Image: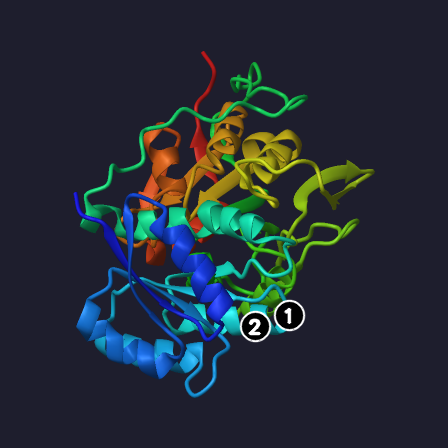
Amino acid sequence: MRKIRVLIVDDAVVVRKIVSDTLSSDPDIEVAGVAANGKIGLAKIPQINPDVITLDIEMPEMDGLQTLAEIRKVYATLPVIMFSTLTEKGGAKTLEALALGATDYVTKPANVGSVSIAMQRIREELIPKIKSFCAEKAGLQPPPTAKPLPLPPNAPPPQPYVPKIGFPKGRQKIEVVAIGVSTGGPNALAELFPVFPADFPVPILITQHMPPFFTRLLAERLSSKSNLNIIEGTPNQVLKPGHAWVAPGDYHMVIERKGSDIVIVNNQNPPENSCRPAVDVMFRSIASIYGAHTLAVVLTGMGQDGLIGCEHIKGVGGQVVVQDESTSVVWGMPGFVTRAGLADKVLPLKEIGPEIINLVKMGREIPLRR
């Protein structure tokens, strides 16, 4: 097993030092080089042959977006992780970087109070992504076929679905689509949503792992290229066909029934799977309201968020469609669901939109209880 070679490109000396020291402390990672701007970074790539690059967005002479565009002209598959500020401007540039071919991003550990806290943030957020993107090249162990993490306190356990006595054979109507996604998600969603027609007959709820600012900008970007109205989810919005809602950063998005309406209710309960918003939280909530009429879709992403939620959805008789490994940036979330035997279909990204439309339009056959 060899170490993962990282090139750090950042104009801030302090940031380069913190990132370099933190990465070097990991036995699987080697900092092969550093660069103070994009031009220097581009020149170093053929010299040091890195496995992955961390790239600051805002730099003098050649910024991160310009540098990324030049990298992609020559190195189409070299993983590039953007370093972004947790601001609206940083969010907009991050989404632009992802559209230009960045593999992923992390937010800069700025204003966290101490160097030790900044280093801890890098260990928790950056290092797992580096290892995930370079695991095969470095000979690291692939993710295990993990058991779902324990349910949080007070969360209802999944219940087996038992069809009603005498329920006639026919079509099971889909009344809601729930999408969970993480790493690689913005581009996957950008490819998925233009497929849906303006008269799509059911609501869509999305949890994408992103911080505040970023989720609203993501919704706006998706909406501008879609036939649907896509917005960030805020409390008391009523679910209706032809609309989609993105869970806001740092809030879990759940739903509740109020009279004849089903509305969005956000909360800041503890993170699950180290995430807030979390897919599991949204999936469980949707399963409790829509039951067997739920269609869950799990797209590209690191970790296993969504696994417990899919257990709930399958437990009440819903369906689960996941993205296949070959078209996923990281086959973590969909991979765990697939290995757990919870996926009804595993499809390449380009086939998922048409499959959703078909399932919503046609429903699915349900057996007569004997």
Q: Is residue 7 above or below residue 279?
A: below
In the image: residue 144, left or right of residue 259: left
Residue, disc 2: 92
Labels 1 and 2 touching (C-beta < 8 A): yes
Q: Quadrant of residue 1?
A: top left
Look at label 2 and name its amino acid: Ala
Q: Residue 274, position in %: x, y?
A: 54, 39
Q: Residue 175, position in %: x, y?
A: 59, 42
Q: Residue 119, position in %: x, y?
A: 50, 50
SS class of the residue under badge 2?
Answer: helix
Q: Is residue 247 above or below residue 6?
A: above
Front residue of 147 and 256 = 147
Local packing at callout 2 (Cα closer than 10 Å; few below 14, some 14-19, many 20+) is some
The label number, if any, that marks residue 88 in the structure image: 1
- The structure residue drawn at horizontal position 50% and vertical position 29%, both measured from the top left corner, is 308
- The structure residue drawn at horizontal position 58% and vertical position 44%, both measured from the top left corner, is 176
